[in-house]
Amino acid sequence: MPILPLLLGALLAGPVWAERSYSPDEILTWQQRSFAGLTNYRLVADQLPPRLHARCDNSASALYLRQRIDLEQTPILEWSWGVDQVFAGTNERSKAGDDYPVRLYVVIDGGLRPWRTRAVNYVWSSHQPVGSHWPNAFTRQAMMLALRSGPASQPGELVSEQRNVREDFLALHGQAPRHIDGLAIMTDCDNSGQPTQGWYGTIRWRATSSSTPR
């Protein structure tokens, strides 16, 4: 589905924030945008650490936050996520296979010049190799970057990620932006029609990399 143009209409620049974190219960309060039905997002508080559970059944909806983040102050994005299973027989570089059990967007909003909109989409890929990247099947303004690939070693277990968002924009879009205008999470399965579920932990913006992402 052409997710990016619809999502970007909601990502209007808000305040600039320095280091901060978003807990799973706070992420659950982000605005939800449906593209094909509603993925069910709910808080799982009886596990440590607490996490957000996403259950997808032929649906695609995102939780998004409108907020300007200064990448010169806080370029490092940390988060944790987990999956139950990946999709069988899909080609994620095609529109028919553009589904991911967990993904996280960071977006620059082009505003009145939508052709200047750009996004980096961190994904847990079903089949693409770790470290590979490709244009989104619906819009070349969004670049996909596979941080994990294939089934999880422990289904449902949270694993940590840490990325320098400014460096990723430079590598994938040829520009090192001073800020982004919003971020979103999404678990979607509407194109493949294969139900799935994923989990998200705390998301953090940091000034410098930590040796061990939390």
Image (tube, rainbow, N blue to C red):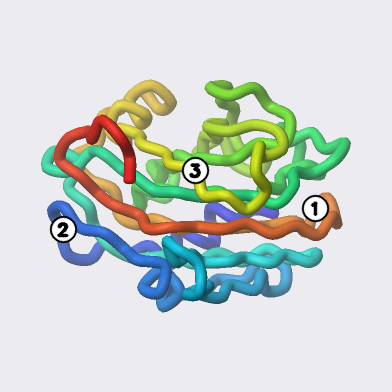
Circle 2: element type: strand
The amino acid type of the residue labelled 3 equals Val
Q: Quadrant of the N terminus?
A: bottom right
The amino acid type of the residue labelled 2 equals Trp
Q: Report crowding for label 1: few under 14, some 14 to 19, many 20 or more residues within 10 A (C-alpha).
A: some
**Of callouts 1 and 2, which one flags the residue occurring earlier in the amino acid sequence?**
2
The answer to whether any part of residue 99 appears in the image is yes
Residue drawn 49% across the image and 43% down it: 159
The answer to whether any part of residue 111 appears in the image is no
| Residue 13, percent from left and from top | 26, 62
Q: How many marks?
A: 3
- Which of the numbered marks, if any, corresponds to residue 159? 3
- Which of the numbered marks, if any, corresponds to residue 191? 1
Q: Is residue 176 left or right of residue 185?
A: left
Circle 3: element type: strand
Q: Report crowding for label 3: few under 14, some 14 to 19, many 20 or more residues within 10 A (C-alpha).
A: some
- Which of the numbered marks, if any, corresponds to residue 17? 2
| Circles 1 and 2 in contact, beta carbons < 8 Å | no
The amino acid type of the residue labelled 1 equals Asn
Indicate whether 55 appears above or below 185: below
Circle 1: element type: loop
Question: How far is the residue under mark 3 from the one under mark 1?
Answer: 26 Å
Question: How far is the residue under mark 3 from the one under mark 2?
Answer: 25 Å
In front: 207, or 199? Answer: 199
